[in-house]
Amino acid sequence: MKTKTLAFAILLLAVAFLSASCFRLKVQLGGPSGEALKEYTIEGKGRQKVLVIPVTGFISDKPGGRLAGSRPSAVEEVASRLRLARESGDVKAVVFEVNSPGGSMTASDMIYKEIVDFKEKTGAKVVALFMDVAASGGYYVSLAADRIVAHPTTITGSIGVILVRPQVSGLMDKLGIAVDVSKSGSEKDIGSPFRPATPEERKIFEDITDEMGRKFIDLVGRNRKIGRENLKKIATARIYTADEALRLGLVDSIGYVQDGVKEARKLAGLPEDARVVVYRREKYPDDTLYNTAAGAAGSSPFPPLVDINLPDILPPLEPGFYYLWLPGGSRG
C-alpha cells in the first residue's frame, strides 16, 4: 500500500513539471522590481549614440522569476529599451547582443516586429551580434537586423520548429492509473499527456509544425536573400558554426563585440568615437559591453516549484510549439 501511495505521489509531481495546466505551484519571495531603466555611457562621446541591447536566455513574453522579485520578460525588456531609444532621438544605431537558443514562437515574432517597427520609425541601423548561441528564435529575432556579425565561436542555425508535448501515459499504465475525459469534439483533448496521440492527431501536429517551419524559412529567404539550394540545407534545422553560417549566408561577417559596434557606427555614418550606451536598471562599477547581467534576460517557460533563480538548465516543458534549439529534448 505504501509503495502505491509513493508511486502515485511521484506521478503527481511528474505531471506538475510536465504539464503547465496541472498542479502549478510557485513560491515567490519579494515583489517585482520597480527600478526604471537609466542610460549609462560605456565609451565614446558626443550626442549621437549607439545603443547595445542584450537578448539572452529563453525568449518569452512571460516574466521571469528570482528570489528577490520578478524580472520583466525578454519581449518587455527589448520593447522598453527600444521605446526609450525612440524617445531620445539621439540613438542612431542599435547592436543586439544575442545569446539565446530561442524560445516561444510568438515571443520571437514579437521582438522581430518591435525591431522592424523601430527601424521604420527612426531610420536607425541595427546590427545583430551573435555570442555563444544564436539559434532558432535567437536567429529569428536577428532577421530584422541590417547586418549580422557572429563571434568566431558562435553556434547558430536550428532554423525550424519543435513541438514539446509531455507524455506520462506509459508511467500511468505501469501504475494502473487512468484519467477519464469527457469531450465535446474528437480532437478536444489533442496533445493530452495522459494518452498517446492518434495517427490523425500526429498528422495535425506535423501539419502545424511544417507550416510554422515554412514561415521561418520564408522569412530567412526574404531577409537574407539566400538561394534555393542553401535554403534547402538550412531547412533541415541543423546547427552551424560561425564559418559554416558565413558560407551559407546566414551571417555577414565574423568578429568580436567591438567589431559589431564598429559595424553599427559605420552603417549609421557615425564617427569612430560616437557614444556607446546601455540602458540598465542599476549602475555597475567599471561597466563594459560584456556585462549582460542586467540585460534583457529571457524567462524560464515553466516556473519551478520554488523559484530560487537557478540557471535555465532544464528544457522548457510547457506544451507548445517553439522556435528553439533543444538538444537532448527529443528522441528519435
Image (cartoon, rainbow, N blue to C red):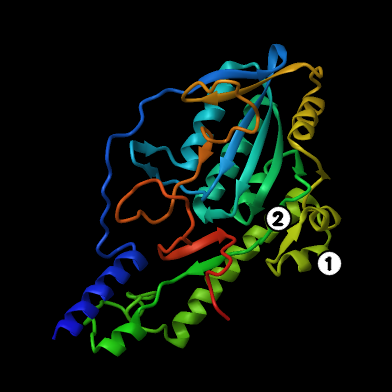
**Marker disc for residue 310:** none
| Marks 1,2: beta carbons within 8 A | no
Indicate the amino acid at tag 2. Answer: Ile
Residue drawn where x is 78% and y is 25% of the image: 265
Q: Is residue 74 above or below residue 313?
A: above
In the rendered image, residue 54, in percent from the top left (x then y), is placed at: 59, 37
| Disc on the earlier residue, 1 or 2 | 2
In the rendered image, residue 248, in percent from the top left (x then y), is placed at: 83, 58
Indicate the amino acid at tag 1. Answer: Glu
- Residue lying furthest left: 1
Count of marks placed on residues: 2
The one nearer the camera, 45 or 132, is: 132
- Residue lying furthest right: 247
Quadrant in the picture for the C terminus: bottom right
Q: For this view, does 14 lie left or right of residue 268?
A: left
- Residue lying furthest top: 46
Q: Is residue 10 visible?
A: yes
Residue 35's quadrant in the figure? top left
CA separation, marks 1 and 2? 21 Å
Residue drawn where x is 49% and y is 77% of the image: 204
Q: Is residue 182 visible?
A: no
Residue drawn where x is 24% and y is 80% of the image: 7
In the rendered image, residue 59, in percent from the top left (x then y), is placed at: 52, 49
The one nearer the camera, 256 or 127, is: 256
The one nearer the camera, 93 or 167, is: 167
| Disc 1 crowd, CA 10 A, few/some/many (<14, 14-19, 20+) | few
**Marker disc for residue 229:** 1
Residue 243's quadrant in the figure? bottom right
- SS type, badge 1: helix
Q: Which residue is mark 2?
A: 155
